[in-house]
Image (cartoon, helix red, strand yellow):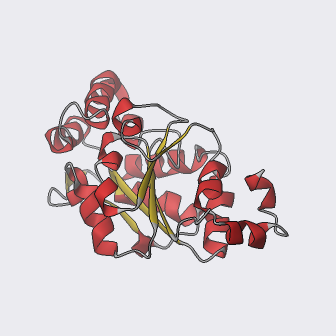
Amino acid sequence: MTGFASIVFDCDSTLVAVEGIDELSGPFRAQIQALTEAAMDGAVPLEEVYGRRLEIIRPTRAQVEQVGTAYVRTLMPHARETVAALRWLGKTVRIVSGGLLPAVQAVARELAVADEHVAGVGIRFHADGAYAGFDAESPLARSNGKAQVIAAWNLPGPALLVGDGATDREARPAVDAFAAYTAVVERAAAVDGADFVLREPSLAAVLALACSDQDRARLADTPWAALLT
């Protein structure tokens, strides 16, 4: 196996077992979930639902911080170990998400991924913490935006993108391969056209896919060797 030099992770339903916007939704949960699923399944463009969801919820600063806490609490099995092993091998690790940037950064910090290697959608608050709007110009708030962000990173190749939704699959032209991660939810919009489908509940499956034969040999005498079995 030749492996991959760069690995780009989606966040919601990939690195973590929840969708952040659903965690924010409170009494609007059914309505918000329906909008989210429509976008993730590719039934409607993301830009048609992104701002609408936030205007319905109008999340406070404290609520967004709670989403970050929920993200860290629901990290997928072996997420920490997988990212640590990838970084130890010298691979480039990035996180690209349509989630709200402060919450996604909480995951990145838990995984020791630097803030500058994370992309999400900015959000603004008033001085009292009330919702003041979001970055409507962010490419991650619209369809095909992930491809734009990944291309701008100019990552070492070959590059692998791991995600669960239509917005991830749409970014396939910006990488060398796309792995649909279905352990949380399986969406045909992601699986159809994917180069790989990872159904294992552990993110160690990503490490196994990303490693070359040489990488495997290097990991043989490390605490991460067990992740490859």
Residue 110 in the image: state x and y as whole percent.
Answer: 58, 62
Is any part of residue 17 visible from this angle? yes
Seen in the image, is 115 located left or right of residue 37? right
Q: Nearer the viewer, residue 102 or 5?
A: 5
Residue 208 in the image: state x and y as whole percent.
Answer: 65, 55
Residue 207 in the image: state x and y as whole percent.
Answer: 63, 57
Residue placed at 78% from the left, 50% from the top? 229
Q: Nearer the viewer, residue 222 or 31?
A: 222
Quarter holding residue 83: bottom right
Seen in the image, is 38 located left or right of residue 25? left
Residue 2 in the image: state x and y as whole percent.
Answer: 58, 66
Q: Quadrant of the N terminus?
A: bottom right
Residue placed at 69% from the left, 66% from the top? 213
**Tag count in the figure?**
0
Residue placed at 70% from the left, 72% from the top? 214
Is any part of residue 127 visible from this angle? no
Name, please, the residue furthest toward the right.
221
Residue placed at 31% from the left, 62% from the top? 174
Name, please, the residue furthest toward the front.
1
224 vs 132: above or below: below
